[in-house]
Amino acid sequence: VAKHPYLLSGLLRHKNGERLVQFNYHRNGKEYRYYKCPKFFLGIEGIDALVWRLVGEAIKNPQKMQEYMAHLKENANDDTLLVEKTDCEKKLKRVKSKKDELWKMWDSDDISKDELQKKIGDYGQEEKRLEKELQDMDAKLSQAKNKSFVIDNLERMSKVLSVQFDMFSNDEKKNFLKLLINKITIERVENTRNIYRYDIDGGLPIPHNTGYFEKSALSR
């Protein structure tokens, strides 16, 4: 197992939505590892340690963990979302059917070119909107499944988590973070070279979901 397996791989984003990707190189026999985007790069050990410490502060707070699990249970029901998805799929099927009917009308000279182009454009926009809604619903359903998994595991492990937390292997840390965090947005503060802002999105009751850090301090 690698000493530093990029704990936040897939979770880090620039404020414009772009992912920070893994990057490493060797110089003078030493390996350097970073997360980077076109705007900046961060050494992995520092930012990984910062996020893991913040998660640990939340995990080791029994009251916060009880509040978090209650919140997850309250929002874990995906029945309504499944109904909405089925309805959206039906609407999308109808729109596609109407587009097919228009082309049949065109083949039989029952519609003008201008009218065809206008209606095809309108239905095309509606089709894209519905497809986007379905993608969003699928993402929410996936999150709901993850919530159920997290609830089951946190309830089972809650009594020992605070003790075992500091003994997690690197792979266990990585998998645990992916369960609890949706994404972490990082941006450099304007008119500075060394100050960065982070925003942790995941619902976990972390004491400081949003905060600042000095890039140079992370390297110490």
Image (cartoon, helix red, strand yellow):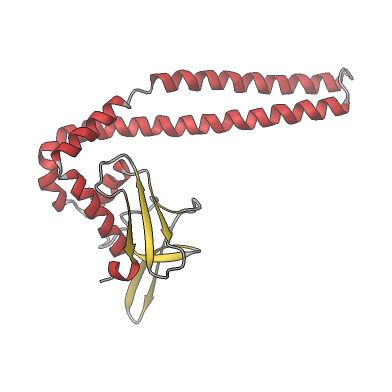
The residue under the point 17% across, 32% down is: 155
The foreground one among 43 and 186 is 186
Res 31 visible: yes
Q: Is residue 154 above or below residue 111?
A: below
Q: Kindly indicate the quadrant of the structure image that contains residue 97.
A: top right
Answer left or right for 34 relative to 113: left
Res 1 visible: no
Tell how many labels: 0
The foreground one among 29 and 95 is 95
Q: Position of residue 140 (x, y in %)?
A: 42, 32
Answer left or right for 163 relative to 117: left
User: Which quadrant would the N terminus be assigned to in this image?
Assistant: bottom left
Q: Is residue 28 above or below residue 43?
A: below
User: Which quadrant would the C terminus be assigned to in this image?
Assistant: bottom left
Q: Kindly indicate the quadrant of the structure image that contains residue 72.
A: top left
The residue under the point 31% across, 32% down is: 147
**Outermost residue, front side:** 191
Q: Position of residue 50 (x, y in %)?
A: 27, 58
The residue under the point 47% across, 29% down is: 137
The residue under the point 28% across, 69% down is: 217
Q: Is residue 129 above or below residue 109?
A: below
Q: Position of residue 168 (x, y in %)?
A: 18, 51
Q: Kindly indicate the quadrant of the structure image that contains residue 101.
A: top right
Q: Position of residue 191 (x, y in %)?
A: 46, 67
Answer left or right for 210 relative to 158: right
